[in-house]
Image: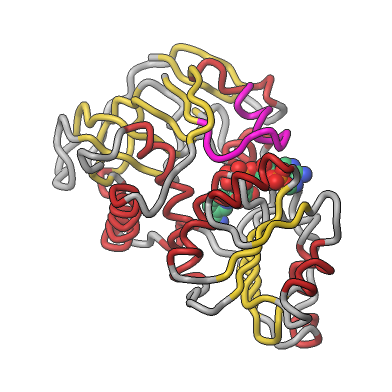
Amino acid sequence: MKAIRIHSPGGPEVLTYEDIPMPEPKAGEARVKIDAIGVNFIDVYHRTGLYPMKTPFTLGVEGAGIVDAVGDGVTEVKKGDRVAYAMIPGSYAEYAIVPAAKLVPVPESVDTKTAAATMLQGMTAHYLTLSAYNLKKGDTALVHAAAGGVGLLLVQAAKMVGARVIGTVSTETKAELARQAGADEIILYTQSDFLAEVKTLTEGRGVNVVYDSVGATTFEKSLDCLRPRGYLVLFGQSSGPVAPFDPGKLAGKGSLFLTRPSLAHYTLDRAELLERSGDLFSWIQSGKLKPRIEKVIPMKDAAEAQRQLEGRKTTGKIVLIP
Ligand code: NDP
């Protein structure tokens, strides 16, 4: 079968499109014939080695397709089921081996591309708004990179609970997309000082929560955007990792809370995974959440997808087709 493999970390050029043996599911595992693959920023970190992986490996952690074979003792799924998953390595391939307990059923009215496009980033928007910080009506949230993959879904999830959303983006085109997703105010953080703008928009009070996926270039000012006892939910580092940090600053800036969450710890067991993915698919079915699939491209062009994502050229999601 065909797969996108990495033999040593590096730039997009280290991705190779090659033939590898068809994998067989062991006990507790299922083999999924992949119909659509979600591209995520974590794929870039796996490629560069920021999140180290044992080489060689097949890139990608998100996909959707049909169960094609199951190993011994599998009860969660059966051959022929349409399923999706996230956070399991090896999805840039024609077939993937996935622990059966990590697969979720995809409802008939949600197409496979949409499932592959939303499992990781949609469940992330779900836990960021409902669990990492319990966002409420009347709260004001600052969402960085509001037209990104997580960003557009996060803006919509925050509006669902009735929060006021201030988004940051780098271009006018992205601003328009974030507004369409429901953002109340947009700051072009590449052209103006987002801290000053947030202070003006909140009459000096600051926001209840900052959702920061950008990291290095935004972290310090994100803290300063918070009102006393506000939450900085630092969930990514698209601009680079945040430098070491003195927790004493949290007291000085208003008894702030800082968390660095990961989806893995908000889908700890099967019940939590099914609850989050179930809510996600019902939001999509009811039209409350409108995913934006910007591009659907052949898997063999995965390197180009990575260049665009890293180069800030994408809005919403890129989906690969094996
Ligand atoms: P995005 O679609 O958000 O792409 C990254 C965006 O970040 C860009 O489009 C850009 O938006 C912004 N950005 C700002 N500075 C830079 C820079 N120097 N280089 C590149 N991009 C920059 O990606 P994802 O939605 O896939 O992921 C966003 C982040 O969230 C990643 O760090 C990812 O790992 C993390 N993440 C974490 C999860 C968790 O559970 N902790 C789950 C999912 C994602 P603009 O041009 O508007 O500035």
Q: Is residue 295 above or below residue 193?
A: above
Measuring from the top left, give residue 230's x and y in whole percent: 65, 80
Q: Quadrant of residue 71?
A: top left
Q: Quadrant of residue 31?
A: top left
Q: Is residue 283 above or below residue 42?
A: below
Q: Residue furthest top?
A: 19
Position of residue 21 in the picture relative to residue 12 (left or right): left
* Image label count: 0
State the residue at coordinates (52%, 59%): 262
Q: Is residue 124 above or below residue 97?
A: below
Measuring from the top left, give residue 118's x and y in whole percent: 42, 44
Measuring from the top left, give residue 22's x and y in whole percent: 33, 18
Position of residue 147 in the picture relative to residue 265 (left or right): right
Nearest the viewer among 194 and 112 is 194
Q: Quadrant of the N terminus?
A: top left
Q: Which residues are magenta?
A: 304-318
State the residue at coordinates (48%, 77%): 136
Colour scheme in use: secondary structure
State the residue at coordinates (77%, 52%): 188
Position of residue 199 in the picture relative to residue 82 (left or right): right
State the residue at coordinates (71%, 49%): 169
Q: Quadrant of residue 105?
A: top left
Is residue 291 visible in the rendered image? The answer is yes
Nearest the viewer among 209 and 76 is 209
Q: Quadrant of the C terminus?
A: top left
Measuring from the top left, give residue 147's x and y in whole percent: 61, 46
Residue 114 is inside the magenta segment: no
Position of residue 297 in the picture relative to residue 228 (left or right): left
Is residue 51 visible in the rendered image? The answer is no
Residue 306 is inside the magenta segment: yes
